Image (cartoon, rainbow, N blue to C red):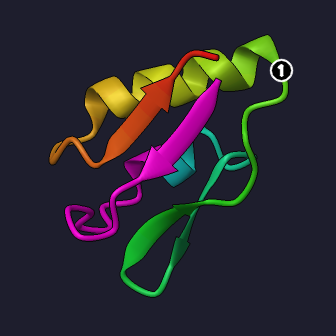
Amino acid sequence: MMVSVDASRCIGCGMCAAAVPAVFQIEGRVSVVQAQPRTAAEETGAFNAANGCPVNAIRVRKN
């Protein structure tokens, strides 16, 4: 799984970083991927964060 954040769309609400801090963090005013998901729980969290992102800035791609 590959996770990315489109910084031009991100509003920095922090929902993703709160849900999966091992994968996302807020830097400045946007979320960034600090590490790709390594566990099944992190993958599920990243997928849920993408689905819950209010501006659809998170992309999840299965390998």
In depth, the one of 27 and 15 nearer the eye is 27
Which quarter of the rendering shows the C terminus? top right
Give neighbour class at mark 1: few <14, some 14-19, many 20+ (Cα, 10 Å). Answer: few
Give the residue furthest to the bottom.
28
Total marks placed: 1
The secondary structure that dominates the magenta segment is loop
Report the residue at 37% width, 43% height from top.
Answer: 58
Dot 1 lies on which element? loop
Report the residue at 17% width, 43% height from top.
Answer: 54
Give the residue furthest to the front.
63
Q: Position of residue 41 (x, y in %)?
A: 73, 16
The residue that mark 1 highlights is: 39
Which quarter of the rendering shows the N terminus? top right
Q: Position of residue 44 (x, y in %)?
A: 59, 15
Residue 30: within the magenta? Answer: no
Task: Report the side of 32 relative to 35 (left or right).
Answer: left
Task: Say if 14 sits above or below 48 in the image.
Answer: below
Give the residue furthest to the right.
38
Task: Report the side of 63 relative to 46 (left or right).
Answer: right
Report the residue at 39% width, 73% height from top.
Answer: 30
Residue 43, quarter of the rendered image = top right
Q: Which residues are magenta?
A: 1-16
Residue 25, quarter of the rendered image = bottom right
Residue 3: within the magenta? Answer: yes
Going by the numbered disc 1, the residue's amino acid type is Thr
Task: Report the side of 38 relative to 46 (left or right).
Answer: right
Task: Say if 55 sits above or below 28 in the image.
Answer: above
Task: Say if 29 sits above or below 46 in the image.
Answer: below
Task: Say if 56 sits above or below 14 in the image.
Answer: above
Q: Position of residue 4 (x, y in %)?
A: 49, 47
Report the residue at 50% width, 24% height from top.
Answer: 61
